Every structure is written in C-alpha cells, then in structure tokens.
Amino acid sequence: MNPELLDLGPQPRILFLSGDPSIVSRQLAGERVSRAEAGALRQDVSTDEITPVALLSYYDDRLARFPYVGLKCGDQLPVAPGSVQAGGFRVTVGGRRYGKGSSREHSPAAERLAGIRLVIAESFERIYRQNADNIGLFTSTDFGLLERIERGEPIQVEELLRDREPLAAAILRSGGLLRFGQQHLQAARGAASALQRPMTLYEKIVQRHLLSTAVTPNDPQPGDGCFLRADWRFIHEYYTGMAAHLLDATFGPQLKLHEPESIVVFEDHTSYVEESPAHLKAGLVPNMRAMQQAQRDFVQRHALRCHRTLTDAEAAQDDGTNVAGISHAMVAEHYALPGQLVAGTDSHTPHSGALGCVAFGVGTTDMANAFATGAVRMTLGAVLRVQLDGRLPAGVTAKDLVLHLLALPEIRAGGGVGKVFEFGGEAVRALSTDERATLTNMTAELGGLTGIVEPDEETVRFLKERRGVDFTLEAWMRSDPGAVYAGRLRVDCSALSPMVASPGDPGNGVALDDLPQRVGVDIAYGGSCTAGKREDFDHYHEVLAWGLSHGLKVPPNVQLFLQYGTTAVRDYCIERGYDRVFAAAGARILQPSCGACANCGPGSSVDAGQVTVSAINRNFPGRSGPGQVWLASPPTVMASALAGELCSFEALKSRRAAA
C-alpha cells in the first residue's frame, strides 16, 4: 500500500446517505448510484443515528456491524446491521452538519471498522471531525472528489490535508492521535506568553493552560490546533472500556497515568439499564454489565476517584454517603472553579462554563491521550458574543431562551459550529447559576466548542451555598474592553415566550402559542443534565403543587417521570417535601442517572406512535426511543403532563381560571 495515497481499493463503492430510503436500500442491495441519482442528501445526520446509544457497549471490532443502523430516511430505518460492511463501501457522503450531537467516538470508529476510509459532507460538527482525525478516518467537504473516485483515480493524502489546520494534518499523517502523542507530547511544557492585546475570558483561560510543543503555535489563533493542560479530566462508563483498550494497545499495561489526582470517573448512564426497553430488546444488558466492570477495573488499577449512580434497590440501602450523579452536573457541583479548564468525554461538558471556566467535550482517543500525556487537544474557537438584553418574562426560562437561539437561521445553518458562546447582558446577570448552566450545557446543540459566562457575585454565592467554597474573584476573570469577537447575537429576552422544539432536531423551535394544532402527549419526562438541577425541580414542584391545589393530577393516559440529576438535588427535594408532591401528582420518581435522555431507562418511548414532551436537550431520531420527542422547559413539561397535551404553565392557569 502506498502511504501517499488514500487506501480506497479498486473500484471503491460510495454510499450516499440520501433522504430517500429507497436510494439507500438500492445501494445496500449492491446497486451503484451517482451523486445526481442520490438526490437530496440527509442533513444533520447525528451520532445517535450513526451508532445508537444502545450499541455503545461495543468498543472493539464488533462495532463494524453497526454504522448507520439508526439513520432515519423519511419514516424508515433502511440500514440493517452488517449491511455497510458487507457492501464493501469505502466512502460515505452526507449533507450539512454531519455528526451532530454526542462526543461518542464509536460513530467514526464503526464507520472505519466497516471499511469506510473517507467521509464527504457539506460540513462537519466539531467533535465528530476531531474524533475522526484521532483514529485516522479522513473527512472532506470537497464534493469534486466524487467523480474522480468513481473514475478510479487515486486520491493523494496530501490533497485531503491541504485545507486542514496543521495539527489535524499532522495527526492524520501520524495515523492517529495516540501515535502522534508518543512522538510529540512527552516533552510538552507550559507555553510562556507575554500577550498584551485585549482578550476574551475564554482566550485568557486558554493562554494560561496552553502547552508548548514542536508542532503547535504558542499564540494560537481561531482555527489553530493546540494542546492544553486541564485542571480536571473526566470520563464515564461508555468511554472508559474503549480508552483502557486503546491505552493498553498503545502503551502496554505498565502505563502510569499523568496526574491521576485530577482525573474523575463517573458511572452515570446505566443504573437503570435493566429497565431500558432498547437494551432489553437487543439483549444488551450483559454487554452493559461488562462495560461497567471494565470501568471499575480501570478505576481500581489506577486508584482513581469514582462516583457511581445507584439503582432504586441500591439507593434504598444507601446510608446517604453515596455522592453521585450525571458527570458534568457533578463537575459543576464538586470540582470546576472560575478560570479553570475542564475536559470530559461528553458533549455537554460545557455545562460547567456557567461558573466561568472553559469546559469542553472530547472523544475517547482524546481522553486516552490526555490520560497518558496530560495534553488535551483543542482547535481554538472564535468567540461569539451572545448579548441577552432585557428580562425574561414570567413563565419563560433559560430553556426557552436556548430553544429560541437554536431556531435562529444562522445557527441552524451551522454558524455556531466550533465557536465559543460568551453569554452576557442583563438577562444573564439576572439568571441563577443553575439557569446559566442550561445555556452553557446546550452550547453542544448550538454546535459550539463551549459556552461561558463571566463569573460574578452570583457565581460566588453558588460556590458558597452548594460547595462551601469561599471564592474570591480575580480581576482578570472577565473579557477585556476591546476584545475581538467573531460575531454578535443580540436577543430581546423580554419579547420571548415559552418554546418547544418539534421532533427530529433541537433546532426545530417554535413558540408554543404558534403551534397550529393541539398535540397530545403520552409521556412527560423531567430530568437530565440540562433539567435535573435544583432550580429545575423548583419549577417541577411549583407546577405540580399548583395542580394539586386546583384538583389536577397527571391523567391516566400520561406517564410522568422525574429523575434527579445528582444526589444533592435529590436530597434538596426530599428536605423540602417535593418528593411527596411529585408522588401525589402521579409522577414516578427516579434516582440520579442520565436515564431516558440517553435511551437508558424509564421514560423512553417503546412505540413509534408515542409522543413525549421532555426537558432533555436532544430529540434526534431514536435518541429517547422510537417515538416522537418534543423538547420544552421544565414548567412546560409539567403543565403538559397535567393537561395531557402541549401546554405552557401560564396557559394552563388561564384555562383553569376560565373553567
């Protein structure tokens, strides 16, 4: 094999991810189609569709059977297990924002293991493309390559690297990040900097954590690749087995992790797996148990700190000393501080940006490399200033605000991909830290690298109240006057109203009052990292307590699930008697875990005809079961549960007053 040429083999087959399921089926049956015959390509293909979450217990060659098995074309899922590998495809072609969603490296890994060597798309999401680089899967936005590939022309590797930033190109030339790290990162040291220009808070934090290497700049600009030292690195059970496998294969079992005291491990997705319809139906529960054990073995081997969520039965036996919850919510509750840098194997790691730190998601190979070398890869993001003017009206929350941002045409078109969202303005200053975390958490859905809020007295209050930390803000912990922004978004928050996002994509936002017809619901779910915080449960309690006082309970045809984000949130609710109100209203109360948001427990749909209203952050096809998921704020989810249809709390109160 010539290393200067992309290894596509003779007469390589191209798989067009068409929006027409019959086109996809014809290709899988052996037919070759042209770009013109493929028609409109599927846009916004998510990692939930490339490798559905139930399959993430596989982290070895078995992944080869599963790329695209969740791909939804029209109302069909045309890709069967094993069909891509059997078809001998070498190139995949998709539309814009390819690889949206999760930081799961399983998606490009499944593609590569199935034989795909090149993915061509109109644009790529940040984490997906970085994960692809890290394992040696090539990506391109050059559709001109297709005719040449169809003619059997050889494709030079350097052609594919020509438009990539230097670090990505160097990693791909090395055959992936771990090999690159062995060659270049063992001697990485802090970069000396005497920059005097006005800087954003994000730029200041990056500069303070920048590592100097022979292949990266000491003054990186937006779009440049660099390596950083993280104050905290964290991982959860869906990634640890794969990371351990990679580390053993590359460095051997004798490897000592870099600064293990700054590594935190979470078991937060799978405590309800034995009640997960997706895992039970596919017979995957034994796989999940093996995956959990692989993480526990890794923790024991390296003496790492670990937080593990409990089943209902385990929680009943707990003496109150188990401290656990969803990873990034736990990081905000226990670890991250203003000015720090946090990397985690979850796309919602930006959650902690609400505290004024830089927190961002990475894939498995990124974290394995960081465990071994202490260096975390980042492609520097340009900063967008999101100016949120005015005050949110009564009944409107940060979730409504972020659903509004997601629906903006420039965001839907990918204008936020890889960017840093700096949230500021009167509305942000008035928000609690819990509400600010909703904004930074859902930076992932906006396409961003991270989200950040300048720390202020509210941050200091939060740290004292929740963590007992007396924190003193430093003068540098703000953006400088004159700092350069790549763009600005301005929103008059006083004009906003309750929002929902229709099934299929978080960007399908619409004002609830503008829905053309009433939408009945079968399931209502409140929880997840986005909506499992204290203030979210204040909202759940407010609506349900009001309902009980007005003779309303959840109707028999609706199932309501409430799942705490962390044990601290659970204990807060129990201390205030919220749990009694939830039970009286007809809710099933669940212990902390990612649960239905990741299709890992009660609250997921079991039938394509079911309609869910959910406070989670994603509604990609298959994300929370086969049904249709509407995203909404915590008050709207509870009001809809009581009404049996999509309904805001204000509208429910008005209906009751008029009855």
Image (cartoon, helix red, strand yellow):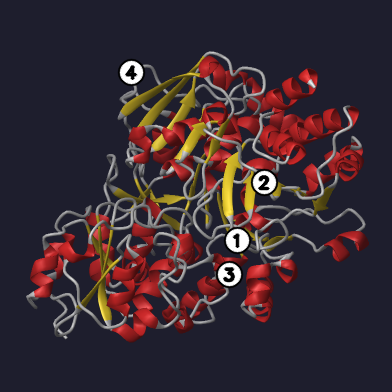
Mark 4 sits on what residue? Answer: 482
Q: Are marks 1 and 4 in contact (CB under 8 Å)?
A: no
Nearest-to-viewer mark from 3 and 4: 3
Q: Are marks 1 and 2 in contact (CB under 8 Å)?
A: no
Q: What kind of residue is marked 4?
A: Gly
Q: Position of residue 455 (x, y in %)?
A: 57, 26
437 over 127 or under it: above or below: above
Q: Earlier in the sequence, mark 1 or mark 2?
A: 2
Label at residue 625: 1
Q: Earlier in the sequence, mark 3 or mark 2?
A: 3
| Corner quadrant of residue 95 | bottom left
Mark 3 sits on what residue? Answer: 54
Nearest-to-viewer mark from 1 and 4: 1
Tell me what residue is drawn at x 74 percent, y 64 percent.
272
Q: Earlier in the sequence, mark 1 or mark 4?
A: 4
Mark 2 sits on what residue? Answer: 521
Q: Earlier in the sequence, mark 3 or mark 4?
A: 3
Q: Can residue 297 be spotted in the picture?
A: no
Disc 3 and disc 2: Cα gap in Å?
A: 25 Å
Disc 4 and disc 2: Cα gap in Å?
A: 49 Å
